[in-house]
Image (cartoon, rainbow, N blue to C red):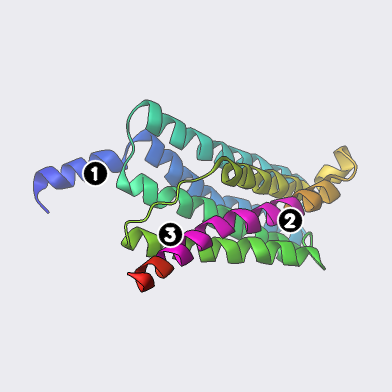
């Protein structure tokens, strides 16, 4: 890699959209740490509000990084790689922490399992299809799925602290989690179908 290429890569990696993506990743240990301190170490309830505030800020960057990348023409290979990774890390970390907290329990654990399994499956399929130069565009329904997941996790992060302000906050979060899990199955099928279709075409060819 020559000096010009290195400088170009460094410049693109430090663009605002990529910085926002990095910030979303950096927010993960803060959210997890607050919930761990409150739930596992029996800390004060205000820690859940801190976790929620950091999570909301991180979720907002998910919209802003793509928005600024488009309007400022700052889309990059690094950003395209990191953006879905950051989303999956944020969602998976919060779901695991909420399960450890006990907010997600019983049958609702299956909703979390469905979401996590879908994310792993889609990641593998995307890598496979990318190697075959097959593109599967993100649908509007997939974007709504992500929004439903983030809103559900936000309600669940508030948890007991949220219940004291708005009754049934936790129950609303659990309901939204089930809704997002159902939509997750449907949107995941698009990627699976694209992979199967290409395999069939290869076999026939």
**Picture coordinates of residue 19 (x, y %)?**
40, 40
Q: Nearer the viewer, mark 1 or mark 3?
A: 3
Q: Which residue is mark 3?
A: 126
**Picture coordinates of residue 189 (x, y %)?**
58, 59
For the N terminus, the quadrant is bottom left
56 shown above or below 117: above
Q: Which residue is mark 2?
A: 38
**Picture coordinates of residue 106 (x, y %)?**
82, 68
For the C terminus, the quadrant is bottom left
Q: CA distance from mark 3 to mark 2?
A: 37 Å
Q: Please, which residue is most extreme toward the front here?
A: 204
Start and end of the magenta stretch?
A: 178-198
Q: Which residue is mark 1?
A: 10
Question: For this view, does 174 lie left or right of residue 132?
Answer: right
Q: Nearer the viewer, mark 1 or mark 2?
A: 1
Q: CA distance from mark 1 to mark 3?
A: 26 Å
Secondary structure at badge 2 equals helix
Secondary structure at badge 3 equals helix
Query: Mark 2: few, some, or many residues within 10 Å (few <14, many ≥20)?
Result: some
Q: CA distance from mark 1 to mark 2?
A: 39 Å
Which is nearer the eye, 34 or 197?
197
Instruction: Give me the residue at 45% from left, 36% from top.
Output: 65
């Amino acid at each position: 890699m020559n000096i010009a290429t290195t400088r170009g890569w460094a410049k693109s990696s430090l663009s605002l959209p990529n910085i926002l993506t990095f910030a979303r990743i950096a927010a993960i240990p803060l959210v997890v740490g607050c919930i761990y301190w409150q739930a596992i170490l029996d800390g004060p309830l205000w820690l859940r509000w801190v976790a929620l505030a950091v999570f909301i800020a991180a979720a907002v960057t998910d919209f802003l990084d793509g928005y600024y990348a488009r309007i400022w023409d700052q889309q990059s290979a690094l950003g395209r790689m990191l953006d879905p990774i950051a989303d999956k890390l944020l969602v998976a970390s919060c779901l695991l922490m909420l399960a450890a907290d006990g907010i997600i329990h019983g049958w609702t654990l299956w909703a979390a399992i469905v979401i996590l399994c879908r994310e792993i499956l889609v990641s593998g399929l995307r890598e496979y299809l990318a190697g075959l130069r097959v593109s599967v565009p993100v649908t509007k329904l997939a974007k709504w799925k992500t929004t439903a997941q983030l809103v559900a996790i936000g309600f669940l992060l508030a948890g007991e602290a949220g219940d004291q302000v708005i009754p049934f906050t936790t129950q609303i979060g659990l309901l939204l989690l089930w809704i997002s899990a159902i939509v997750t199955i449907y949107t995941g099928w698009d990627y699976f179908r694209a992979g199967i279709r290409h395999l069939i075409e290869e076999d026939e060819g």
